[in-house]
Image (cartoon, rainbow, N blue to C red):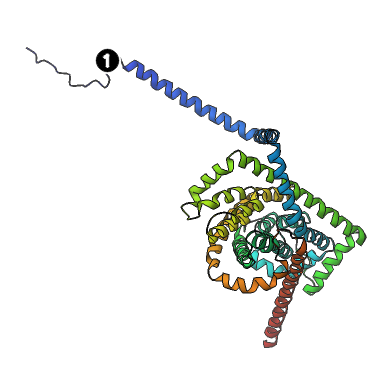
Amino acid sequence: MPAARHNYAVPLLPKGRCFPLLTLTVAVLTALALLYALGRRMLRLAGKYHRQLARFFWTALVLCFVTGMVLQPKTVYEGAVTGLNAWWNIVFPSLLPFFIASELLLNFGVVHFMGVLLEPVMRPLFNVPGAGSFVVAVGYTSGYPIGAMVTARLRTSRLCTRIEGERLMAFTNNSSPLFMLVAVAVGMFHDPALGALIAGAHYLANLTLGFALRFYGRRDREVLPAPPQTGNIFSRALREMLRLQREDNRAPGQVIGDAVKKAVNNLLNIGGFIILFAVIIRLLTGAGVIDLLARLLGLILGPLGLAPAVWPAVASGIFEMTIGTKIASEAAAPLLHQLVAVGVILAWSGLSVIAQAASMIAGTDLRLTPFIIVRVFHAALAAVYTCLLFGPARPLAETLARPVFAPLVEHTASLWTGAWLPLIVFLLALGGIVLLALFYHLCRGVRILIFRTGR
């Protein structure tokens, strides 16, 4: 009798459930395939119609802004008045002399003269042409966004490549020294000695980034034709300046009139941005967006030890630095925390300044992305330098700052009384750079003479 066969196979699924599970699996796989195809289609459409999508996004933002203006007219008026006061009392008097002087120096060929003379100095330091020395001088003695404006002029005049222009624009845009020394230190903190600390951390951070940016885009293939290397470097620089003056057929009066007209137009453009973002900040504050943004920033600033009282100041400073620094100076927090917040805000400069810089370079091929990235690193470095300088630098700042700025100590943020002081500092800085170049070429000539004599 044959032995009985035993089936030891264990069924994987209970009887009757195999078909529904198979159907569910097919449905899930089909849905994933459809989602994948739909995602690829949407990505292709987004790549194809990215301009239309961006315009739709900005249109939606404008509609929200107009709705807020209709619903909160008093808030809009107060924000506009705040922005107008900041522009008229701080920005206009501190930037107008620089805008006029920079236009005149560009039109009369002085920048071309410096470009030939300072090429051996600026190239090893910052990997920028000699004409960049003018941008450095005006950028570190004026304020936002004149560095971007002059860099755009250099690029339009073919005095720098695109990469060199992006390097210059990234580390030569600084807050005005008069704004930091008078408006912030005196008008907001009521302590002139803090001006040296605030300005020192701000400038040291940007100079550090300037040295680091010399390695940015080193494989750039764009090369501008170099001027002929015949004759002495001083005679070559003078010939370059005279050549530009011969090509410009305008009378000196017309040159000055055009410079004033362009300077005022640029300042009106900047004033519009400041007023616009002042209104936006008021509306966002009333809607609770600034408080929400402050809480989100607290996730980053809290572990770093920054007091919660200054978080709203940093959140406001993301949009406009003048309002942000004012809130930081009034925050119920230790002085070091207030100064760190001010350093971060001034270095970041705010979306208002970034928009101003974007408008200045709109007619060129300069990209804004490197400028924004450097602003983030500038903010981080400014905070670090503020912490390092707060202890050892403050006694020295109290000794040096009070006698120098005693005539400017006013309990108001108006800069009209000292509007020409930064221009004098600018001319001194410009003269110092030229003297540095002269000293460099003199030492080089002596070295060559010694080597030739030794032979």
Q: Residue drawn 55% across and 52% down? A: 310
- Residue furthest toward the bottom? 454
Q: Position of residue 33 (x, y in %)?
A: 48, 26
- Does any portion of residue 363 appear in the rendered image? no
* Location of residue 418 with respect to 366 vertically, above or below: below
Q: Residue drawn 82% across and 73% down? A: 235
* Location of residue 122 with respect to 310 vertically, above or below: below
Q: Position of residue 157 (x, y in %)?
A: 79, 56
- Does any portion of residue 237 appear in the rendered image? yes
- Residue furthest toward the top? 1
**What amino acid type is highlighted by mark number 1?**
Lys
Q: Is the residue marked by circle 1 packed among few (<14), some (14-19), or many (20+) residues within 10 Å?
A: few
| Residue matched to label 1 | 15
Q: Depth check: give the residue in front, 261 or 112.
A: 261
Q: Depth check: give the residue in front, 125 or 144.
A: 144
Q: Left or right of 193: which side holds 264?
A: right
Q: Secondary structure at mark 1?
A: loop
Q: Left or right of 142: which side holds 250?
A: right
Q: Position of residue 411 (x, y in %)?
A: 69, 61
- Residue furthest toward the front? 411
Q: Depth check: give the residue in front, 381 or 208.
A: 381
Location of the N terminus by quadrant is top left
Q: Depth check: give the residue in front, 227 or 243.
A: 243
